[in-house]
Structures are given as C-alpha cells and as structure tokens.
Image (cartoon, coloured by chain):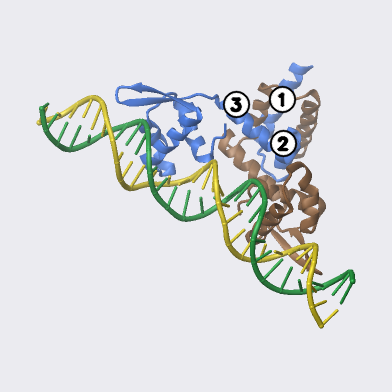
Chain colours: A brown, B blue, C yellow, D green
DNA sequence: CCCCGCCGTTTACAGGCGTAATCGTACAAG
DNA sequence: CTTGTACGATTACGCCTGTAAACGGCGGGG
C-alpha cells in the first residue's frame, strides 16, 4: 500500500493526535501546509479507500484513525532508501553523513551510546 | 531538480560506468528492469532537459554523462527522509533498525568501528 | 416543520511519471 | 547515388498526485 507524500502528512497527524475528525486534521495541518479543508478531505478519502485509515461515524462526522502503524511505514520508507542507495547497509549511510559533515558532536555521542548498547545486547 | 525513481536507475548506471551511450545504458539496465531501449531513451532525454546529464556527440551517437554528483543526490534523498521521518537525526533511524532487528552483528561491528573513528576525529 | 449550512462524497483538472511506439534524418553499405 | 537502418526527437497515453470546487443529504435552529 503506497502512501504519497501529501497523504503521509495526514497520517502523521493521525499518528500523533490519534483518532481525529477531518476538521481536526485540517486544523493541525492547514497552517504550515496551507491546504484548504477540501484538500485534507480528499487525502483522507484516498487513505480511506486504500485502507490506510478507518472512519467511525460520530454524529454527523467521522473520526479517522490510522490503520497502519507508523513504525511499519517508517520501516518501509527507510529500508527502501537503504536498499536503493546504500546497498541495504546502515553503515554507509552513517558514513555518508559523517563525510558531508552533517553530524554534530551530540549526534556522535548519541550514536556511540546507542551502538554500545546494541553491542552489549548482541554479545 | 527532481529525479524520479525510474530516472535514478539510469543515473546509477552513468555514475557507475561513466559516460555511456543510450545503448550502453539500455544494456546495463535492460535485463533486470526489462525496459525496452525506447524507455531508456525517454529517460535519458528527460534527464537531459533537466540538465541532470550532458550529451556529447560521438559520430552519430551521444555519450551521456552525469552532471550531478551521486553524493549530492544521495545526500538530498537521505536528508529528506531523515527530516520527514526522524526529525533530522540519524540516531533515531539507527535505533529504529535496531528495534526491528534489522542489524546483523557485522552491521553493528561496522557501525561501532565507524563511530569510534568519528569520535576520535571529533575529540 | 422547513430551510440553511455543514459534512462527507464525487468530480475536476493540470502536471509528473512509467512505459513505449512512431517519426525524421543522417550515415553506411551496396 | 540510392536506400535501409540505426539514432535521437517527438508524440502517446493512462495512472498517480496535488490541489481543490461542486454536489447532495441530514440534522439543528427558527
């Protein structure tokens, strides 16, 4: 199930805020994306027909709720990128960011901590 | 300059093999993507009008050469993903793969080595 | 009890993309 | 010199996407 870039903005709101009405979503997004409410409704409907969200009727409105886990989505996107660009390996990606000077000392420290933790678990 | 998924396949060949004719590219790709040569030519032309590749006439053919660095492309794609899904930070991405059990001991070892190297440099 | 307005649904439409066939032309073979 | 052919260029076309307006019904206010 493919979720487009615009659709993912809507999903992010639902993941963050939980079940929401179209109005809620429009309110949460509208400002920075400056979409009209109509646009948000279209996206919600496309997600609905894809089965990516569910809709429960509450009075004359619907509460939309995500039907796929954010972690699954994130995983698919991430793995896709790794496979396409880094031969499926994480290390080259990290290396790439290191080379292009995109890592702050804090980033490095955090990565270090994380890796040591993994290493301990694994060993 | 946006490079689509199909176009990036063509770019990958040019990055890997250097300046190539349309036939070369078609040969290098054709098998696994099973595109006709016509499709490859279309993609090369779209890349040409975008300025992503250059074309130098050699006899009655052209040699196509990348005009953008792979590292730039890789960087844009990677940064885009990090920004969209991981708040721009690498650590959460690594953490995500760790949680979903996508890291082999080799991966962890390599990451560890890499990070220590970075840490030494930085310190 | 009737009508207005608010919802969700349907329809719209231009641009990008994947995929490819067709066209026009210039070189190579005869 | 003619002609077939192999190129790049042009055209095609349906689907997806971003963005949004139009439509139709139902429920609440008068």
Helix, strand or loop status at disc 3? helix
Q: Residues within 10 Å of mark 3 (few under 14, many from 20)?
A: few
Residues tagged by mark 2 and mark 3 found on one chain of the structure:
yes
Residue at image point 69% right, 30% down:
B111
Q: Residues within 10 Å of mark 1 (few under 14, many from 20)?
A: some
Say above or below: B39 vs A109: below
- Quarter holding the N terminus of chain A is bottom right
Say above or below: A119 vs A10: above
Q: Is residue B7 left or right of residue B73?
A: left
Residue A70 in view in this figure: no
Q: Position of residue D21 (x, y in %)?
A: 66, 55
Helix, strand or loop status at disc 1? loop
Q: CA distance from mark 3 to mark 1?
A: 13 Å
Q: Position of residue C7 (x, y in %)?
A: 76, 63
Front-lying residue, B99 or C4: C4
Mark 1 belongs to chain: A
- Quarter holding the C terminus of chain A is top right
Q: Which mark is residue A102?
A: 1
Residue A79, image quadrant = top right
Q: Is residue B36 left or right of residue B117?
A: left
Q: Which residue is mark 3?
A: B72
Q: Position of residue A88 (x, y in %)?
A: 59, 37
Residue D28, image quadrant = bottom right
Q: Which residue is mark 2?
A: B83
Q: Residues within 10 Å of mark 2 (few under 14, many from 20)?
A: few
Residue C26, image quadrant = top left
């Amino acid at each position: 199930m493919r979720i487009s870039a615009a659709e993912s903005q809507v999903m992010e709101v639902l993941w963050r805020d939980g079940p929401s009405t179209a109005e809620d979503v429009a309110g949460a997004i509208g400002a920075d994306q400056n979409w009209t409410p109509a646009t948000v409704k279209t996206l919600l409907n496309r997600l609905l027909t894809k089965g990516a969200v569910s809709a429960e009727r509450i009075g004359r409105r619907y509460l939309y709720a995500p039907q796929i886990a954010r972690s699954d989505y994130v995983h698919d996107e991430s793995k896709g990128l790794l496979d396409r660009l880094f031969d499926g390996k994480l290390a080259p990606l990290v290396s790439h960011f290191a080379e292009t000077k995109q890592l702050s000392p804090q980033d490095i420290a955090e990565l270090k901590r994380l890796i040591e933790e993994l290493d301990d678990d694994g060993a």
